[in-house]
Every structure is written in C-alpha cells, then in structure tokens.
C-alpha cells in the first residue's frame, strides 16, 4: 500500500496542475477510470482491471503515491485510486483534461 498524503486533498490548484501535467496519457486514462464510489463511498475508488502494459501504468501510479494495485482478486487484477489519486482525478475532470 502506498502512503496517503492528507494534505493532497487540500493542495493548491497549481500544485495539482503540476502533478497532473507530469502524467502520461495512459496514466491519466487509468486515473480517470478509477472513479469515486467504490463500496458505495465517495472517498473510495472503484477498481480498474489491469492487463498487459496496464501493469506498468498501475505500478507507476502506485510509485507516485496516487493509488494501489493488487493481484489474485477473484475479479481480476485491479488498480484503485487512493484519496490522492481521486484528488488528481477531480482536478483533471474539473479542468476538462479528463474529457477526451
């Protein structure tokens, strides 16, 4: 599990922009796909199935502290945004960057 930075959700928009600006296209797509609502809660993300090259994307997002991924779930291998990933996702969505 990655460490959650509680300050991320209160991060200034320019800091969010800097973090979002360093994401690759595949990283953005995975962050956007893991939307709020996991387990019926807005502060928990839904899982995104990962296969092939998606493992590298999930690992890179985990290394940036934006989410976690696991193996061996009965639902397949999944990536989940953490609270920091959801904050970046929200930034991307509110700035039309997530509407590709």
Image (cartoon, rainbow, N blue to C red):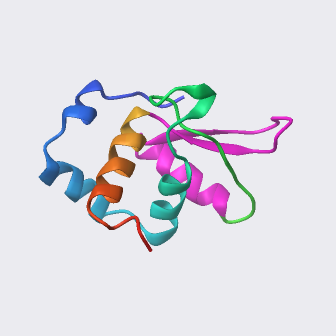
Point out residue 100 in the picture as x, y percentages from the top left corner.
44, 74
Q: Quadrant of the N terminus?
A: top right
Please name the residue shown 27% across and 34% down the image.
9
Q: Is residue 63 left or right of residue 20?
A: right
Point out residue 89 in the picture as x, y percentages from the top left corner.
39, 50
User: Magenta includes 56?
Assistant: yes
Q: Is residue 72 left or right of residue 25?
A: right
**Residue 55 or residue 15, whichever sits in front:** 15
Point out residue 90 in the picture as x, y percentages from the top left corner.
34, 48
Q: Looking at the image, which residue sits at the far bottom?
A: 100
Please name the residue shown 35% across and 57% down the image.
93
Question: Residue 77's quadrant in the figure?
Answer: top right
Q: What number of labels is visible?
A: 0
Residues drawn in magenta = 54-82
Residue 62 vertical position relative to residue 33 in the rendered view, above or below: above
Q: Is residue 53 left or right of residue 30?
A: right
Please name the residue shown 21% across and 58% down the image.
18
Q: Looking at the image, which residue sits at the far front?
A: 40
Residue 70 vertical position relative to residue 99 in the rendered view, above or below: above
User: Magenta includes 76?
Assistant: yes
Q: Looking at the image, which residue sits at the far right?
A: 74
Please name the residue shown 54% across and 35% down the image.
37
Question: Residue 23's quadrant in the figure?
Answer: bottom left
Residue 71 vertical position relative to residue 3 in the rendered view, above or below: below
Q: Is residue 30 left or right of residue 43?
A: right
Point out residue 34 in the picture as x, y percentages from the top left corner.
55, 47
Question: Residue 57's quadrant in the figure?
Answer: bottom right
């Amino acid at each position: 599990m990655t460490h959650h930075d509680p300050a991320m959700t209160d991060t200034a928009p320019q800091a969010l922009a800097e973090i979002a600006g360093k994401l690759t296209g595949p990283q953005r797509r995975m962050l956007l796909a893991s939307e709020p609502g996991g387990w019926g809660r807005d502060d928990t993300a839904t899982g995104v199935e990962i296969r092939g090259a998606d493992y590298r994307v999930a690992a890179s997002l985990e290394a940036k502290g934006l989410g976690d991924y696991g193996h061996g779930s009965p639902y397949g291998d999944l990536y989940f945004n953490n609270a920091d990933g959801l904050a970046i996702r929200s930034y991307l969505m509110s700035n039309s960057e997530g509407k590709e």
